[in-house]
Structure formats: structure tokens, C-alpha cells
Amino acid sequence: MSQATITLTQPSSAPNFCFEVVASNGQSDFIQSDWDYPSTASLFGFVPCDCGSTDGTVDCKHKTATQMISAAYDYLVDHVGETVDDCR
């Protein structure tokens, strides 16, 4: 199975707070929108809410989307450089 690596990128020519998911086959996805943080972080083990009723971009009865997106960003920063099985 291929491996995906997440790398924090903040080149001067790109907006701040960008990430890149790089697969072992060389294909990469540039993550620029904060709405993509929860789904990207989920590839690496992030769970937006234990209730399981949201993907992290929609409020649930426990957390707002803003809280989950912020938590996903923090998770990504903490997991930069990790390699996981590519389940996309």
C-alpha cells in the first residue's frame, strides 16, 4: 500500500497556514483552505468530535465547526512529517 506524508509548507509565495499531502508515488495535494483541515487531519487520525455526527465542517451539538477546524489545524501542525497508510 502506498504511503502519504504530510508536510507543513509556508513558502513566501503562498498563503500562510498551508499544508501538503505527498503520496509515495509523488502525487501531492496542496491544502490551502481551512475547510480542508478536518478531512486532511482525519487521514492522519484526527477525530473532529467523539459523537461521530460531523466531518468537522458542520456544527454538532458538542462543538462548533470553528472549534473543530481550529483543532484540526493544531493537529496538522503537531503531525507534520508523519507517514500513514494512504486510504484516500
Image (spheres, helix red, strand yellow):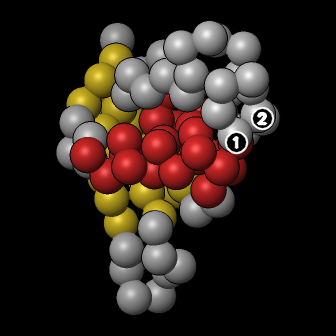
Amino acid type for the residue under numbered disc 2: Val
* Tag 2 residue: 58
Residue 79 left/right relative to 69: left
Q: Quadrant of the C terminus?
A: top right
Relative to 13, say whether 79 is above or below.
above
Q: Nearer the viewer, residue 35 or 8?
A: 35
Give residue 65's mark: 1
Residue 60 left/right relative to 85: right
Residue 11's image quarter?
bottom left
- For the point 49% across and 22% down, the residue is 47
Residue 81 point in image, percent of width and height: 21, 45
Residue 68 point in image, percent of width and height: 58, 40
Mark 2 and mark 1: Cα distance apart in space = 5 Å
Amino acid type for the residue under numbered disc 1: Ala
Give residue 82's mark: none
Can residue 28 be seen?
no
Residue 27 left/right relative to 82: right
Residue 39 left/right relative to 10: right
